[in-house]
Image (cartoon, rainbow, N blue to C red):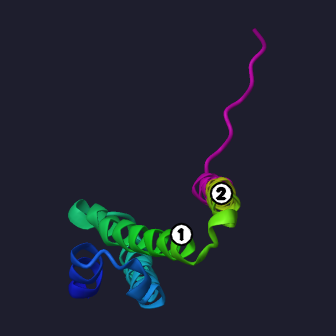
Amino acid sequence: VMKLLTSQTILTNDFRTVNYRLVSLIGVTVCATSLTVMIIRWADGIKGVEVYYGFPWAVGCGILLSAQFLELTVQSPPEQMANATAIYCLVQQVGQIVGTSGSAAALQQLFGVRLGVNLDGTPLPKKTKV
């Protein structure tokens, strides 16, 4: 893997010979594996050093996005390079916005459900007129 990522691209400067699909699959595999580990381990909350489980996920996503961008750059015709790059960046930003909004909505829903479960047996305070 490291030979594929370093020596073949940096030493020879021939970016057209790299199999970007393989590099993308490595990135997806690292992302999916680390997310699975996080889901399993964080089911009852994060404990201590487990916060570092996010690092392999970030590395895998970085590998994936870099491989996609390099493949786009290598394969795009020169007259379409600006359009392809702009659309790629736009789609990434839309994905980040949708992902952030979706996760915030899911967390609010989960917070409301857990708050309701924890407060079901609690009597409400009496309201007094001031």
Residue identifier under label 2: 82
Residue 29 visible from this viewpoint: no
Label 1 element class: helix
Percent coordinates x, y for residue 28 in the rendering: 46, 83
Q: Residue furthest top?
A: 130
Q: Amino acid at mark 2?
A: Ala
**Is 95 on the left-hand or right-hand side of 26?**
right
Kindly report the distance in space between the C-alpha atoms of the residues bearing marks 2 and 1.
10 Å
**Is 55 on the left-hand or right-hand side of 68?**
left
Residue 15 visible from this viewpoint: yes
Query: Residue at horizontal 35%, vertical 79%?
Result: 14
Q: Quadrant of residue 30?
A: bottom left
Sequence order check, earlier mark of 2 and 1: 1
Q: Quadrant of the N terminus?
A: bottom left
Residue identifier under label 1: 73
Q: Is residue 74 above or below residue 84?
A: below
The one nearer the camera, 82 or 108, is: 82
